[in-house]
Amino acid sequence: MSTEKKEIFERVEEMLGAQGFSIAAKDDTRPWGGFFVIDENQAQDFANQYFDGIDVENLRIGGKLSPKILIVAPQARLSWQYHHRRAEIWQVVEGTVGIKRSNTDDEGEVAEYNPKDQVKLQQGERHRLIGLDGWGIVAEIWQHTDASHPSDEDDIVRVQDDFGR
């Protein structure tokens, strides 16, 4: 892992700790960057901190909201993907990121998003998070759309992936 990547993960981990969040999982091995998963019981606190207090009970159909912090490296792209059992809400925390969106498998144009910008991705909507000139940090909440079969990491349909996944 590069020194720069190690430093940003350490800084974000310290920031989350200072905000009182319990980290349920951490993955800094992704080729595009990685993420932190926050304890589900802190979903409302997470929403208060990163989503201007959006009421998570209005999002909670059943199961978890899976609050996360995504960290995307400069010039890296997550897969062009969609989900069958969740919608997502993203809010940029730090840096400028690119996001592509489309209702078809054809990639849309890159739109730039800055801190405090929020994006609501619908179930089935194709999307891709892109690192631009610097590291990007994005808060994410999943809105599960099937209470009897909540979304998980297997609910990713990759249309295109730079890393052959």
Image (spheres, rainbow, N blue to C red):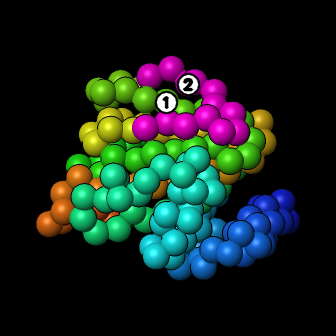
In the rendered image of this protein, does residue 22 appear above or below residue 76? Answer: below
Which image quadrant for residue 91? Answer: top right
Q: Residue type at mark 1?
A: Lys
Crowd rating for badge 2 (residues with CA inside 10 Å; few <14, some 14–19, many 20+):
some
Which image quadrant for residue 105? Answer: top left
Location of residue 48 in the rendering, given as x and y in whole percent from the top left corner: 58, 57
Q: Is residue 104 left or right of residue 65?
A: left
Say which quadrant the C terminus sits in. Answer: bottom left
Name the residue at 58% across, 47% down. Answer: 52
Q: Can residue 74 be seen here?
A: no
What is the secondary structure assignment of the residue under circle 1? strand
Q: Label 2 belongs to which residue?
A: 110
Q: Report the magenta residues as a range.
A: 108-120
Looking at the image, the residue that sits furthest to the left is: 148
Q: Is residue 147 left or right of residue 4?
A: left
Find out whether residue 110 is within the magenta segment: yes
Location of residue 70 in the rendering, given as x and y in whole percent from the top left corner: 59, 56
Name the residue at 59% across, 77% down. Answer: 23
Which residue is more in the foreground, 140 or 70?
140
Crowd rating for badge 1 (residues with CA inside 10 Å; few <14, some 14–19, many 20+):
some
**Label 2 – label 1 distance at C-alpha:** 5 Å
Location of residue 86 in the rendering, given as x and y in whole percent from the top left corner: 30, 51
Tags 2 and 1 touching, CB below 8 Å: yes
Name the residue at 28% across, 69% down. Answer: 63
